[in-house]
Image (tube, helix red, strand yellow):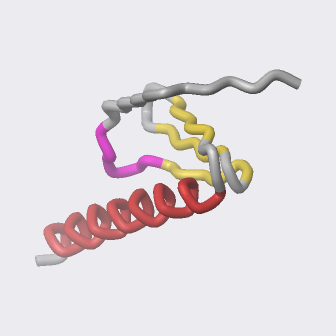
Amino acid sequence: MQYYLFEYVQVVINCAIIRGLRYNRATPTFHQWRDNRQVYGLNFASKDDADNFAQAMLSSLDILNSVLTYHLFT
């Protein structure tokens, strides 16, 4: 088994959260989502990190869907 020590790691993802985006928790620490063109995936160091990300993503999708629903029916 190998161990790696990283003093500083930065990961940046630039992905629009759009209507129709499908989000999936494939495992407790690997989540993926897809839009019309591409599949994205993130592997998290801990379940807590993954849960925090999932909560933010699902909250964003709920807001997006509620705003779209509001505009469609008003």
> Is 18 included in the stretch rendered in magenta?
yes
Looking at the image, residue 71 lies above or below residue 2: below
In the current view of this chain or complex, which residue is farthest to the right? 1
Q: Residue at x 55, y 26 (%)?
A: 6
Q: Is residue 35 left or right of residue 28?
A: left
> Is the C terminus in the top left, top right, bottom left or bottom right quadrant?
bottom left
Looking at the image, residue 21 lies above or below residue 62: above
Q: In this view, does 67 lie to the left or right of 65?
A: left
> Is 29 included in the stretch rendered in magenta?
no
**In front: 19, or 23?**
23
Give the dominant element type of the magenta stretch: helix, strand or loop: loop
Residue 58, position as x, y percentages in the image: 44, 63
Q: In this view, does 33 lie to the left or right of 57?
A: right
Q: Residue at x 48, y 27 (%)?
A: 7
**In front: 48, or 60?**
48
Residue 31, position as x, y percentages in the image: 60, 46
> Is the N terminus in the top left, top right, bottom left or bottom right quadrant?
top right
Q: Quadrant of residue 67?
A: bottom left
In the current view of this chain or complex, which residue is farthest to the left? 74
Q: Residue at x 36, y 69 (%)?
A: 62
> So how many labels did they put on this image?
0
Residue 29, position as x, y percentages in the image: 67, 49
**In front: 70, or 3?**
3
Numbered range of the magenta stretch: 16-21
Q: Quadrant of residue 50?
A: bottom right
Looking at the image, residue 39 lies above or below residue 33: above
**In front: 7, or 65?**
7
Q: Residue at x 44, y 37 (%)?
A: 35
Q: In this view, does 31 lie to the left or right of 52?
A: right
